[in-house]
Image (cartoon, rainbow, N blue to C red):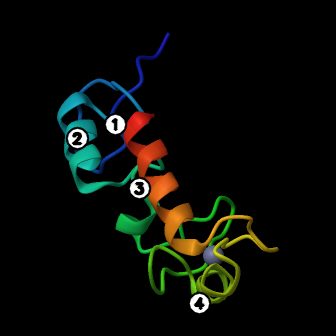
Amino acid sequence: MTRRRCTRPGCLRPHQARGLCNPHYAQANRRGEFATTPRTERGLCTVDGCTRRHDARGYCGRHYVRWRRYGNPTGGRSPLPPRELADLRRLVGIAA
Ligand SMILES: [Zn+2]
Ligand SMILES: [Zn+2]
């Protein structure tokens, strides 16, 4: 029976979460090293599944162009004008 330990080099504290001990986990969390960190803070496009770098307005260059053209970063025409859509997203974000 082996107890798991923190994976940070030289750290002998017991494992707490995500391969790290409690203090290291808290530190990594603060630095935004986990996937739950908002994508823009990691410099990535906010579109789900997109791994390109953030360029403008939370989107990569490609998604930003679509967002400007259609008011929707993932493609086709939107029934709502971009500004209303953005407001709607903001509202949903606050409500969630
Ligand atoms: Zn540690
Ligand atoms: Zn993108």
Where 67 sits versus 47, above or below? below
Disc 3 + disc 4, Cβ < 8 Å? no
Q: Judge left or right: residue 95 versus residue 66.
A: left
* Circle 3 crowding by C-alpha within 10 Å: few under 14, some 14–19, many from 20: few
Residue that protrudes farthest toward the right in the picture = 76
Q: Report which residue position mark 3 lands on.
A: 38
Q: For the point 45% across and 34% down, which residue is it?
A: 96
**Disc number at residue 63?**
none
* First along the sequence among labels 1 and 4: 1
The amino acid beneath tag 4 is: Gly
Foreground: 79 or 49? 79
Residue 19 visible here: no
* First along the sequence among labels 2 and 4: 2
* Circle 4 crowding by C-alpha within 10 Å: few under 14, some 14–19, many from 20: some
Disc 1 + disc 4, Cβ < 8 Å? no
Q: Report which residue position mark 1 lands on.
A: 20
Dot 3 beta carbon under 8 Å from ligand 2? no
Q: Quadrant of residue 67?
A: bottom right
- Which one is in front in this view, the residue at disc 1 or the one at disc 4? 4
* First along the sequence among labels 3 and 2: 2
- Which one is in front in this view, the residue at disc 3 or the one at disc 1? 3
Q: Report which residue position mark 2 lands on.
A: 24
Dot 2 beta carbon under 8 Å from ligand 1? yes
Residue at mark 2 to residue at mark 4: CA–CA distance:
35 Å
In what element is the residue under mark 1? Answer: loop
Disc 2 + disc 1, Cβ < 8 Å? yes
